[in-house]
Image (cartoon, helix red, strand yellow):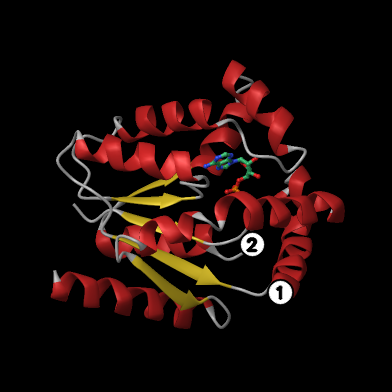
C-alpha cells in the first residue's frame, strides 16, 4: 500500500495538496480535522467534545483521535493507500498508527513535510478565514496557539519518521502546481527506490 503522511503546520497546504495526490495516486484521504468538523456539523457527541478543543487551538486527546482515525480507515478496506492529513500530530499517535498499520501487514511509506515559514502561515490562515468559516482561523490569538502547539507537540513527530529514514521535506512556498510536482517527484523517487 502507498501510505503517506502529509505533514506540516496549520496553513501549510496539506488539504489542498492531499486533494490532488489522492486523485493522481488513487488513495483515500483521511484528514482528522475534516472528520472532526463533519462531526461538529452533525452535532455528534464526538463533535461536541472535539469542538471544545478545536475552538481553543488545542489538540483533541490522543485516545479519541486515534480511535476515530482507525474506525475511519476501516471504512475503506479496499484502499490502495491512505494520505494521512493532520495525523499523526503527537508521538503517541505516530506509534499507534504504526501499530495499526502493522495489523494490516502494511506501514508508512513516507512522510512528506510541507515547509512554510511562520510569517507566511499567519498570512495564509488570516486569508483563509475569509472563506473557510472556521472559527479557529478567524482569531489571531488562536492561530498563534495552533502554531505554538504545532512547534511543541507535533514538530517532534518529524524525528520519529527521520529515525525510520522516511522523512522528506518539500518547500511549501510557490504555486499549488509547482508544490504538487515537487511532492510527486519525491513519491515517485521513493517508489522507484523501494
Ligand atoms: P486541521 O484541520 O488539521 O487544521 O485541524 C483542526 C483542529 O482539529 C486542530 O487544531 C485540533 O484541534 C484538531 N485536530 C485535527 N487533527 C488532530 C490530531 N491528529 N490530533 C489532535 N487534534 C487534532
The part of the image, by quadrant, that contains residue 93 is top left
Q: Nearer the viewer, residue 158 or 86?
A: 158
Question: Badges 2 and 1: C-beta atoms under 8 Å apart?
Answer: yes
Kindly identify which residue carries mark 2. Answer: 11
Give the left or right position of residue 190, taking residue 175 as reference: left
Q: How far is disc 2 from disc 1 in space, using C-alphas?
A: 9 Å
How many other residues sit within 10 Å of disc 1, few (<14), some (14-19) or many (≥20)? few
The residue lying at 60 percent from left, 16 percent from top is 45
Count of labels in the image: 2
The part of the image, by quadrant, that contains residue 166 is bottom left
The disc at residue 120 is: 1
How many other residues sit within 10 Å of disc 2, few (<14), some (14-19) or many (≥20)? many
Q: Nearer the viewer, residue 176 or 150?
A: 150
Q: Is residue 103 above or below residue 1?
A: above
Horizontal and vertical percent position of residue 189: 23, 78
Secondary structure state at the residue bearing disc 2: loop
Horizontal and vertical percent position of residue 192: 15, 75
Give the left or right position of residue 169, taking residue 145 as reference: left
The residue lying at 26 percent from left, 58 percent from top is 109
Q: Is residue 18 above or below residue 180?
A: above
In the picture, the quarter occupied by the C terminus is bottom left
Give the left or right position of residue 51, taking residue 163 as reference: right
Give the left or right position of residue 48, taking residue 39 as reference: right
The residue lying at 58 percent from left, 30 percent from top is 61
The residue lying at 46 percent from left, 83 percent from top is 178
Horizontal and vertical percent position of residue 132: 70, 52
Query: Where does ligand 1 appear, by image quarter?
Result: top right
Among numbered discs 2 and 1, the one appearing first in the sequence:
2
Q: Is residue 117 above or below residue 13?
A: below
Secondary structure state at the residue bearing disc 1: helix
Amino acid at each position: 500500500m502507498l501510505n503517506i503522511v502529509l505533514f506540516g503546520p496549520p496553513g501549510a497546504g496539506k488539504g489542498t495538496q492531499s486533494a490532488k495526490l489522492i486523485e493522481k495516486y488513487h488513495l483515500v484521504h483521511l484528514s482528522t480535522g475534516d472528520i472532526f468538523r463533519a462531526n461538529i456539523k452533525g452535532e455528534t457527541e464526538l463533535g461536541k467534545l472535539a469542538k471544545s478543543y478545536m475552538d481553543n487551538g488545542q489538540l483533541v486527546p490522543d485516545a479519541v483521535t486515534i480511535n476515530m482515525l482507525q474506525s475511519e480507515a476501516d471504512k475503506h478496506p479496499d484502499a490502495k493507500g491512505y494520505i494521512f492529513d493532520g495525523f499523526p500530530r503527537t508521538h503517541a499517535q505516530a506509534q499507534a498508527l504504526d501499530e495499526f498499520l502493522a495489523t494490516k501487514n502494511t506501514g508508512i511509506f513516507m512522510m512528506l513535510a510541507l515547509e512554510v515559514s511562520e510569517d507566511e502561515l499567519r498570512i495564509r490562515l488570516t486569508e483563509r478565514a475569509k472563506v473557510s468559516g472556521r472559527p479557529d482561523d478567524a482569531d489571531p490569538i488562536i492561530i498563534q496557539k495552533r502554531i505554538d502547539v504545532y512547534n511543541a507537540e507535533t514538530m517532534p513527530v518529524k524525528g520519529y519518521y527521520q529515525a525510520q529514514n522516511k522523512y522528506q521535506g518539500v518547500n511549501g512556498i510557490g504555486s499549488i502546481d509547482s508544490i504538487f510536482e515537487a511532492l510527486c517527484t519525491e513519491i515517485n523517487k521513493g517508489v522507484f527506490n523501494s
